[in-house]
């Protein structure tokens, strides 16, 4: 169907509704192979991505090479290693390269692989043609919990340690990887909050000023630039923030300011963040003009989301990705004010984080973003990029097909030519199973669709029926839900590739969806899930 006027989301909904109604009555359909896009086009793209070594410290050289080649396919030309050395007064210290300082982390078995991470990343980046910023040391507990940024002596000791680290890293990697070493990243993150306000000058004098001067002295490390990524709170005073940025930038030789947008962490919203980047742009331009500097302003767009369950461990919740649509909006809001868009972090975009139960989401998230990267069109499906939790109704362990391991929310429904495009679930015992998606924000939905494949010669069977529900969270606990019935499809005369769906009479605000599949045979093959 061709139209001479721009289609609106409402028109797409009417078309999809008629198709779904036909399918629910006939249960026969042609393969659905095209992505469901809106007519909204965006030019925003991230071209840099953070690596947090602790979250990927068990990856080997091949996995890093594959990972960075995949990043290059979606326009990543810069990686920022968040830190090369960690220190915590409670647990000791660990390095991610062969560092002379003693590694006191008790994980002796992981020691050799962990200390190879920087080498693996640099080699993979060189192979992919990607520039690298190496982060120096991080001491999160001391900085954020003990407020050691208030202590001049501690700041001075960190300046000395940072310089020592830079020397060690350059001695280890400068000769071989100097062509891709773009600069240094300083991991200590100051904030716009009032707690930091009396200490901006001190932080500049005791850390940023002497360290950046030493890193630049005599061109010892080539043309390496220096980057920082502070955090802004929408509740903070914007004038004070501008003063802080001017203080830090004026008294140091920092080249790249890349504030975190705070959308994932929750310190900013899409309504507020544009104003903060506009204000930051003005002060960066002012410093450049007054002091003949050439400081670049980047935006660090977070791709994770913090859910509302206060009992959830931080290292787990930050593995959960932000929806693709929300992430695109984050980029669109700040793009007019910055020179480059980067994101935190790679462990939601690839599978270099081993032994993770979130491998599926990495695949779906990467593919969903890649579709957007190639087309510029925002997805219609609200589920795109989300993790799908699949569990048996009887609580027993499900098993999955070794070859059919595709994600369920990449935005494309598979065709019958390649089993790898499906998620294959063993249902020989005919146990019903749930597929559940939790949204990071409540979303207005009206239709849920899932697609199934049949090949009776190899015992891949369509379901007997599928039940659809949406859920809403109750109270402050993320894990307490009320499930609301949407509809039930029965696959009486279905065959081949079949799309099933349920349509709600009126749009409803949902915190997630649940699809219950009642299997029809040994294997159930699924791809893809759409939520509109």
Image (spheres, grey):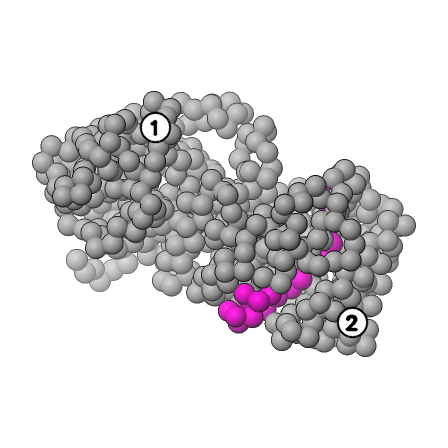
Select label 2 or label 1 by which is in front. 1
**Residue at coordinates 48% horizontally, 51% vertically from top-left?**
351
Span highlighted in magenta in the image: 121-141
Query: In what quadrant of the picture does the C terminus appear?
Result: top left
Instruction: Residue under label 2, please give it.
Output: 216
Residue 197 or residue 212, whichever sits in front:
212
Let me know if residue 510 is in the magenta part. no
Q: Examine the rendered structure and indicate whether residue 291 appears above or below residue 396.
A: below
**Residue at coordinates 85% horizontally, 58% vertically from top-left?**
160
**Residue at coordinates 66% horizontally, 55% vertically from top-left?**
115
Q: How many marks?
A: 2
Instruction: Residue under label 1, please give it.
Output: 392
Indicate left or right for 114 with 406 as reference: right
Q: Earlier in the sequence, mark 2 or mark 1?
A: 2
Residue 301 or residue 350, whichever sits in front:
350
Mark 1 neighbour class, 10 Å CA radius: few under 14, some 14 to 19, many 20 or more: some
Mark 2 neighbour class, 10 Å CA radius: few under 14, some 14 to 19, many 20 or more: some
**Residue at coordinates 19% horizontally, 60% vertically from top-left?**
2
Q: Secondary structure at mark 2?
A: helix
Query: In what quadrant of the picture does the N terminus appear?
Result: bottom left
């Amino acid at each position: 169907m061709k139209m001479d006027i721009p289609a609106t989301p409402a028109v797409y909904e009417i078309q999809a509704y008629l198709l779904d109604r036909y399918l629910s009555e006939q249960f026969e359909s042609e393969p659905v192979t095209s992505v469901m896009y809106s007519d909204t086009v965006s030019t925003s793209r991230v071209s840099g991505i953070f690596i947090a070594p602790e979250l990927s410290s068990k990856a080997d050289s091949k996995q890093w090479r594959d990972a960075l080649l995949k990043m290059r396919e979606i326009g990543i030309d810069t990686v920022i290693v968040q830190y090369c050395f960690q220190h915590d007064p409670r647990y000791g210290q660990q390095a991610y390269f062969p560092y002379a300082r003693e590694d006191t982390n008790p994980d002796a078995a992981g020691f050799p692989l962990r200390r190879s991470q920087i080498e693996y990343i640099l080699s993979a980046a060189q192979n992919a043609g990607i520039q690298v910023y190496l982060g120096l040391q991080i001491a999160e507990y001391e900085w954020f919990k003990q407020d050691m940024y208030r202590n001049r002596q501690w700041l001075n000791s960190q300046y000395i340690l940072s310089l020592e680290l830079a020397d060690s890293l350059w001695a280890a990697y400068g000769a071989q990887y100097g062509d891709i070493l773009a600069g240094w990243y300083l991991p200590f993150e100051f904030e716009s909050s009032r707690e930091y306000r009396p200490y901006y000058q001190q932080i500049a004098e005791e850390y940023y000023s002497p360290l950046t001067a030493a890193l630049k002295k005599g061109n010892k490390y080539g043309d390496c630039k220096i980057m920082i990524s502070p955090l802004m709170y929408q509740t903070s005073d914007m004038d004070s923030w501008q003063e802080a940025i001017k203080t830090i930038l004026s008294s140091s030789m920092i080249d790249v300011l890349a504030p975190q947008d705070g959308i994932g962490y929750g310190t900013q919203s899409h309504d507020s963040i544009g104003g903060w980047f506009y204000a930051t742009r003005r002060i960066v331009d002012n410093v450049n003009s007054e002091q003949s500097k050439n400081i670049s302003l980047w935006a660090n767009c977070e791709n994770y989301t913090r859910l509302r369950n206060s009992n959830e461990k931080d290292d787990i919740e930050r593995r959960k990705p932000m929806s693709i649509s929300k992430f695109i909006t984050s980029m669109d809001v700040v793009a007019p004010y910055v020179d480059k868009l980067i994101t935190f972090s790679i462990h939601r975009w690839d599978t270099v984080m081993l032994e993770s139960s979130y491998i599926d989401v990495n695949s779906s998230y990467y593919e969903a973003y890649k579709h957007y990267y190639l087309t510029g069109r925002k997805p219609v499906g609200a589920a795109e990029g989300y993790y799908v939790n699949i569990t048996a109704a009887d609580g027993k362990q499900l098993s999955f097909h070794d070859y059919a391991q595709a994600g369920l929310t990449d935005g494309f429904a598979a065709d019958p030519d390649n089993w790898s495009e499906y998620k294959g679930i063993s249902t020989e015992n005919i146990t019903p199973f749930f597929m559940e998606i939790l949204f990071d924000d409540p979303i207005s939905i009206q239709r849920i669709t899932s697609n199934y494949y049949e090949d009776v010669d190899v015992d891949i069977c369509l379901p007997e029926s599928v039940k659809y529900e949406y859920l809403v969270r109750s109270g402050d606990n993320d894990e307490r839900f009320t499930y609301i019935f949407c509809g039930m499809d029965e696959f009486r005369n279905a065959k081949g590739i079949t799309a099933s769906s349920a349509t709600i009479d009126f749009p409803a605000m949902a915190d997630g969806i649940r699809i219950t599949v009642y299997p029809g045979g040994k294997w159930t093959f699924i791809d893809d899930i759409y939520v509109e």
